[in-house]
Amino acid sequence: MQLPVVLIVEGPSRADLAAALSRWPARLAAALLIALVGAAAWWLARPDDSLPQTGSVPLRITSAPSDAAVLVDGRARGRTPLTIGVAPGQHTLLLQRAETLDERRDLTVGPDGAALHAELWRRTPRLSRLRPAFPGAAITGAEFLRDGRVALAVALPVGDERQLWLRDPSGGLERVGPPDAAGPAAISPDGGQIAYLARRVGPGAAGPAARLDELRIAPSSGGAGEQRWQLVPPDEQLTDLGWAPDGARLLLVSTQRPAAGGLRGRLLLLDASGGEPRELVALPGEVVPGSYAWSPDGGRVAFLAQAGGLTALCLADVGGSFRYLADVSRDDLSPLPFAPIAWSPDGARLLYAAPTLDRPSRAGWLFGPAPAFGLFGVDAARPLGRPLGEAEGQSPAWRRDGTVVALHRGGEGPLLLRTVEPDGATRDVGEVGVTPSAVYAARWDTVHAQALIATRAAASLGATRPEFWLAGFGEEAAR
């Protein structure tokens, strides 16, 4: 006879589970299970950098400094250096790092992929005070060469001798050009040639003819210059010069005092190989030496001019048109040689800084209120400058990624670096470190992430020599 059997199955109690887990094999198994679950969750939620994508191509992204967060089309993809797969076509990249400015790039990725290297701008630059090679000499101007080196124009304390010096990245100075230049000189963008103004020599060179009336060009390595052009009118003399970005043309500036009185300045464009110059504009005043800011394509040049106690920002087209943009200062006898203007990378637009008339002025000390400087934009569709919202700042610069930065001094402290949005919104992002006494201006080399900053005491205190600083915002400058 078979007896009935009843099986009762009950789950383990908590006490039973605790006892089981107290044994190390069970603990190990539980840990492995948790790790597998976590790995699966990460696999499903991670950026798809390594996921195989149909039709994707490699995109290599590096930066200096490295370890910058990368967002592609708004999605986090990792940190530099980084190689990811993306679809061919247009992509928007954003690189971010705590110590640097954000870098935005629009990139076209081809069927074979692409690579991008970004030089990130540090919020606090490395500063170097620029000094002449000799005690007592004065730096009268400074400019960037195409490769990022700095050229200094120096006037000696006795006589009218002028010299040009190149500064290497370590701060050393090397004299370039002819040994006997007695007038203003300028180095070509590639550093290979020196153009300078000279006086005619020989019979009839004394008296009224003893003026700067010749343009000569010499190799940077030294030696005598070759005459390329000579000014004829006896009541006119050459006062300054500068190279166009292509290194094939020169700007010549002359000052004329007509017999009837007054003063007239002329801006001439000359082929560096010789020939006759073409007059771009004649002004009832003088052109401020060294204040030229060329558009990237060399088709237009902005400069400062002085007339009737005003310093004005002007724009000349090589085709012959002229535009009076704005007054930038009043009763300044020695304007700094940097025009407050920035060209967009494509040369189609420009920004400039000028005093505003509709905003409260910042109270000054001893000499009354100091004007607030606003930013204004000009493009082909709007030939007259219009305020860029409520943006304030001076010496704007258009970076290669299309963003705008400017210098600003809100009080008595050091200059600040600020970013400027298209709607005029501003944000102070770093401290430059230079504390100007009153007047300041900058010339930018955005390709190499650096700026030349000139400062000077107020004109009311009398003409004083400007001080020049080199501010390096790039990775190389920080080493």
Image (cartoon, rainbow, N blue to C red):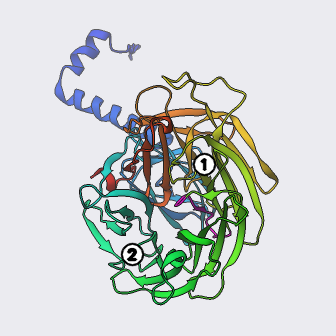
Distance (Cα) linking label 2 and label 1: 56 Å
Q: Quadrant of the N terminus?
A: top left
Looking at this rendering, what residue extends furthest in the front direction?
A: 207
Establish if 236 lies above or below 312. below
Q: Secondary structure at mark 2?
A: loop
Q: Amino acid at mark 2?
A: Ala
Residue 48 picture location, percent across and down: 51, 50
User: How many numbered tags mark residues here?
Assistant: 2
Which quadrant of the figure has residue 323?
bottom right
Q: Which residue is mark 2?
A: 181
Q: Is residue 252 visible?
A: no
Q: Secondary structure at mark 1?
A: loop
Whether the magenta-drawn stretch holds residue 17 is answered as no
Instruction: Find the magenta span and give its range.
Output: 289-299
Residue 248: give its label: none
Residue 221 picture location, percent across and down: 33, 82
Residue 354 horizontal side relative to residue 67, left or right: right
Q: Which residue is mark 1?
A: 73
Residue 474 horizontal side relative to residue 246, left or right: left
Residue shown at the point (52%, 61%) measured from the top left: 290
Which quadrant of the figure has residue 260?
bottom right
Q: Residues within 10 Å of mark 2 (few under 14, many from 20)?
A: many
Residue shown at the point (56%, 41%) measured from the top left: 394
Residue 348 picture location, percent across and down: 71, 60
Q: Amino acid at mark 1?
A: Asp
